[in-house]
Image: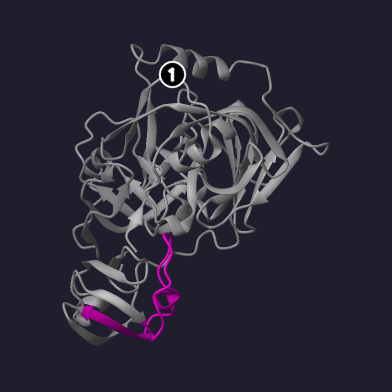
Amino acid sequence: MSRYNPFEWRCRILACIFPVLLVQVQVHCQDAARDFHFGPSGQASVALTDESIIEVTINGEGPFKVIFDTDANVNLLDPEVIAQLNLPASNIVGQLSGLSAGHLDTKPFHVNELRIGDLTLNDQDFFNAPIPLPKSYAIVGAIGYELFSRVLVKTDYEHHQLVFFDPARFSHTGSGQKLDLKSDSRSMVAKARIDNNIGDCVLDTGFLGENELSINGWFARRYHLVHPFSRRYHGVFTQGADGKAPPATVERIRDVCLGDACVPRVIAELSEGNDKNPDTAGRIGVGLLHRFTTTIDWQHHAIYIEKSSAWNRPAVYNMTGLDTDLDEQEKALIVSKVFPHSPAYRAHLKVGDRILLIDNHPPAPDWFSDDPAFLKPPGTHVLLTVRRGSTNLQLTLTLKDTL
């Protein structure tokens, strides 16, 4: 499947347009008044998928599926759900900016009660933003900064749990190491070592897909991270709500270290974007964050990381050499890219082909991973029924790690 970072929207607050909201954002971090509460235990938990999806209720309605996105600096909600819940709008108008420098006019809508498991948050604002995913996925929004800036959040992908703690009652007792977070950002930014080069990286649970790391162009160029003799692919690999990201090269980085934990052979997307005055070196995605259990202590601008059981096992990249998109009926896969010298290239697949059947079954991908038949071990033969123009073809792929 083509890879998306669907919630790559950032609230851009202009002082001449947004003075009220700017004041509210500044005051919130210092205000001792609590707009959340737990049950007697002082903590709560909710199921967490590999794609960072959790379920919430809004004003007693739901459940609704949203992304826990640590780089969403405002709450986001699809306009259809806002209309369904008849949420009242503010008269403040602003803009959200995306990864392709696009902009979306937006405004906040007020929610009286947001419930996540046994955690209740009152008087929350959600900005209206269309969700660029098929409706059948039922993903309606994103929650990030407005959650972890209030309560401590533990993400445990290995056991599929998101756990919340009351900051007034929490003390860290685990075995993980502490990383400092930048205090002047509404994103989670920590130092990482990328091929022995130190840079600030955003820890982004909303950056999904096979690519574990996205490196900004200035950092890749300064440290010559595109290795001339490496196996790699070139193209556009990421798309957000405002369009496609700049072209990039995908290859494996020798290692990426968070503190003393160094993950080998990380799949990295090295941008060719013209970011001359960047704030960060890049973005660490959920594929790499899956390797750790993390506890976010925003009040002390710290994050604790503990290794999961498979923390240093190299990830498998695309086994087919295909990028695909679902068609409008969500029944066929449309080939959008064929990697050179890949299994798909050798099977004579072409851009525009419609994959109707995979091993005689309709395709069953989701927006995070490929069809299960494409995830089998290297050397597996996969039979494809393909429509090209008015002709149906039978083509056979032999799976292989392409990177």
Left or right for 261, reference 385:
right
Residue 325 x, y percent position in the rendering: 31, 63
Residue 123 x, y percent position in the rendering: 61, 26
> Which quadrant of the structure image shows residue 230?
bottom left
> Which quadrant of the structure image shows residue 371?
bottom left
Say what secondary structure mark 1 lies in: loop
Query: Quick check: 344 above or below 238?
Result: below
Left or right for 24, reference 232:
right
Left or right for 270, reference 288:
left
Residue 368 x, y percent position in the rendering: 43, 60
Q: What residue span does the magenta drawing correspond to?
A: 358-387
The residue pinned by badge 1 equals 91
Q: Amino acid at mark 1?
A: Asn
Query: Quick check: 186 above or below 62?
Result: above
Query: Quick check: 264 above or below 25?
Result: below
Crowd rating for badge 1 (residues with CA inside 10 Å; few <14, some 14–19, many 20+): few
> Which quadrant of the structure image shows residue 36?
top right
